[in-house]
Amino acid sequence: MIGRFIEAAGASIRARPAAWALALVAFFLLFPKVDIWASGLFYEPGAGFVHARGWFAEFVRKGLPVLLFGALLFVVILWVAGRLLGQRFLGIDGRVTLFLASSLAIGPGLVVNTLLKENWGRARPSQIKEFGGDAVYTAPWEVTDQCVSNCSFTSGHGALGFWLVAFAFLAPRRWRGEAIAAALLAGSGVALVRIIQGGHFLSDTLWSAVIVVSITWALHRLILGKR
């Protein structure tokens, strides 16, 4: 059932990507304060974002990138070993390795962290006046100057969390839908942690999901076809 739902949703997004993107923009146009509301759930006046430094939150912030880069490195090692020994380990070949590496490099790497976070200028929740900072809140579609570098839009950690769908796309077809659902749930958990920490707005994480999942799906089709 979950698998059929994921497949149906994926087919709809593939058929009407512009409509889904416009729907996301429309949501924040209709509810412009939803970002402030969502972040405000975890903010206490005079104390700030009180759960920002818990052990799990710190693991997500510092440990998750290491874990995911380590997973990709492990895949590369298995591919190289397979080439040297003339066999395939865990079904990993050159195209699988290329797919995983390129989806990480282009999605979270190039688009999110290089093009958007370094140029969009959106201040983080913890930096805006509503939550004790000095910066001005801006909508997700506004290019601004409220932040100089490593800014809020979009979420880098959220992008890494949602990049887990790349591994889910490699699951056997009979339970690929469930694997994608699990990856999206994990990515949503990472996104929630970053919102709780005051590091990102809800919209930052949603756009990271849209960008990374779309790029990953396109690269899967391009590199691996119907595998």
Image: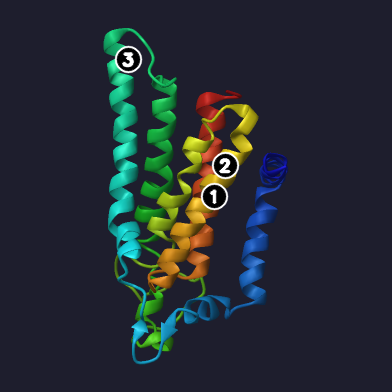
Label whose residue precedes the other's in the sequence (3 or 2): 3
Foreground residue, 115 or 74? 74
Q: Is residue 44 left or right of residue 19?
A: left
Determine whether the residue tagged by mark 2 lies in a helix, strand or loop. helix
Which residue is tagged 2? 180
Label 1 with label 2: CB-CB less than 8 Å? yes
Please say whether residue 52 is visible from this viewpoint. Answer: yes
Quick check: 127 above or below 90?
A: below
Question: Disc 1 on helix, strand or loop?
Answer: helix
Q: Is residue 183 left or right of residue 103?
A: right
Q: What secondary structure is marked by label 3?
A: helix
Judging depth in this view, the residue of 86 and 152 nearest the camera is 86
Q: CA distance from mark 3 to mark 2?
A: 27 Å
Where residue 99 appears, as percent x and y from the top left, is: 44, 31
Question: For mark 2, does the 10 Å Cα neighbourhood hold few (<14), some (14 to 19), or many (20 or more) residues?
Answer: many
Identify the residue at horizontal 62%, vertical 28% (top origin): 173
Image quarter hosting the C terminus: top right
| Mark closer to the chain start, 3 or 1 | 3
Q: Is residue 63 above or below residue 36?
A: above
Question: Three-letter amino acid code at disc 1?
Answer: Leu
User: Circle 3 is placed at which residue position?
Assistant: 82
Please identify the quarter of the rendering in which residue 179 is found: top right
Q: Position of residue 38 (x, y in %)?
A: 53, 76
Image location of residue 29, percent across then percent down: 64, 74
* Residue matched to label 1: 184
Labels in figure, total: 3
In 3D space, how far apart are the residues under numbered discs 1 and 2 (Cα atoms)?
6 Å
